[in-house]
Image: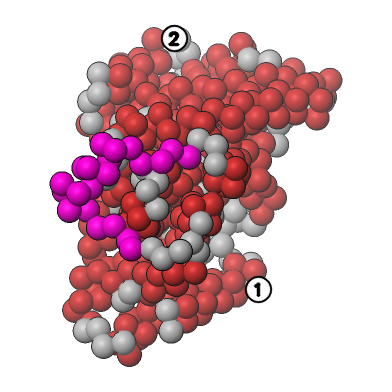
Amino acid sequence: MALLPIVLTLAVLGVQLFYFGDFTPHIPLAIGIAITALVGLKLGHKWDNIEEGVFHVINISLPSVSILITVGMIVGIWIASGTVPTLIYYGLKILSPELFLAAGMVLCSIVSVSLGTSWGTVGTVGLALMGIGAGFGIPMYWTAGAVVSGAFFGDKISPLSDTTNLAPAVTGTNLFDHIRNMLPTTVPSMLIALVIYLIVGFTLIDTSQVSFERIDAITAALDNAFWISPLMLLPALLVIFLAVKKQPPIPSLFAGAVVGGIMAMAFQGAGLHETFTFANSGYSIETGVAEIDPLLNRGGIQSMMWTISLVLLALGFGGALERTGCLQAIIEVIIARVKSFAGIQTSAILTSVATNTVAGDPYLSIALPGRMYAPVYRGMKYSPLNLSRAIEEGGTLVSPLIPWNAGGAFVISALALGIAEGNFENLLYIPLAFACWLSPLIGIFYAMTGLFSPKASEEEITAWEDSGEPVAELTA
């Protein structure tokens, strides 16, 4: 019974995506909410209770929707202010095609750690990198893979990130202990990804085919359409400065939008009403250069509405599954049958991945397994730091790899991958985002070998007893 709404929803989703070839998962998810509600009514739940569960999960994730709205404003205004064009311009002048993918990943990781938001990084620096990659003739999916690897790596270990704070909160661990315990999987996965991007840059990308005439055409078009100057980077530097000062992400991003708007009026000749339009409806320009126009004609709050509506429906589906007990029932069966630490750790990672896939929500994929598995770790006398790392890897890092997940939908929209228009080859960014899927695999390897899998300390055990944390009674 618990599997029924999940299986039926995935079937409807499969028909929409693969039979009709229509990448709009909204209606299948709405049908999924209805199916889950019918199952809940059959199990004895009242509609009011199910509705409350739907809106409870949506309410918890509203800060992410707020970030989406703010990022939409920033993208439109930072293009109009010349910030994004300046990043593209200097990137084409300074970066070499061989080093581009590796440098792009490192840059996104630094910005994401500073901002504490992978979405903000993807929508700003990531968008600029897509323009640079287009100038070098690098396929969009390779650039997108490097951007996603760097941006979500930063989100995973930044103390400013909401998911990085959520994972230790639901497992009862310390934030900075949680971050330190993620380094054994995060550092190797990033180093492997870096080496792969370097090898690809020097071997698979034919630099002899890079058209410097095309690069010159792009930089000339940007120079003609905008006033290009290092001064135009001020909005981005302000946001990073505020992040370093540990200011909240939404006000910091909004401050970057305000400063960008002022610079659009002061240096790019925009009027006040035009600036408001850029923030709401996005920027529009025709440079005559096919590689750059699609990246500059975007942004604005309205550009995020497709993604926001998908996020809200995915959250609602996840909330219905949680409130009706479907997800808990499945997890309890897994817990009852897996008794070894390796099995539990692997199950926790895969449960987060499955919740991400089914519910489409990175927050639920962290919160639900975190709540359900924590007593089992305590019963096994293993530190819950193992669990917080598992759900962060299966939750935060896998989110952008699932196209109908909130993270995946945002990546596809913000980087202009054009999946809804039929450019399905750009979904290759998923396997090419090496750091995102290597980290969970390394985590499973550690679980199998016992490496970097700390046992509970006496202080932790005492703290559980003092606080009355639930401890599962496990038989041999």
Query: In the picture provided, is 186 more to the left or to the right than 434?
Result: left
Question: Mark 2 — residue?
Answer: 230
For discs 2 and 1, the disc positioned in front in the rendered view: 1
Q: Residues within 10 Å of mark 2 (few under 14, many from 20)?
A: few
Examine the rendered structure and indicate whether residue 105 appears above or below residue 1: above
Label 1 near label 2: C-beta < 8 Å?
A: no
Q: Is residue 377 found inside the magenta-colored segment of the image?
A: no
**Amino acid at pointer 1:** Tyr
Residue at point 54%, 46% (across, down): 447
- Magenta stretch: give its range: 453-473
Instruction: Judge whether residue 472 is colored magenta.
Output: yes
Near-viewer residue (106 or 295): 106
> Residue 286, percent across and down?
54, 33
Which quadrant would residue 301 be assigned to in this image? top left
Q: Residue at x 40, y 46 (%)?
A: 382
- Which residue, given by chain and number where applicable, does mark 1 sit on? 19
Please, is residue 126 above or below residue 208 in the view? below
Mark 1, other Cα within 10 Å: few <14 / some 14–19 / many ≥20: few
Q: Image quarter for residue 293?
A: top right
How many tags in the picture?
2
Q: Is residue 400 visible?
A: no
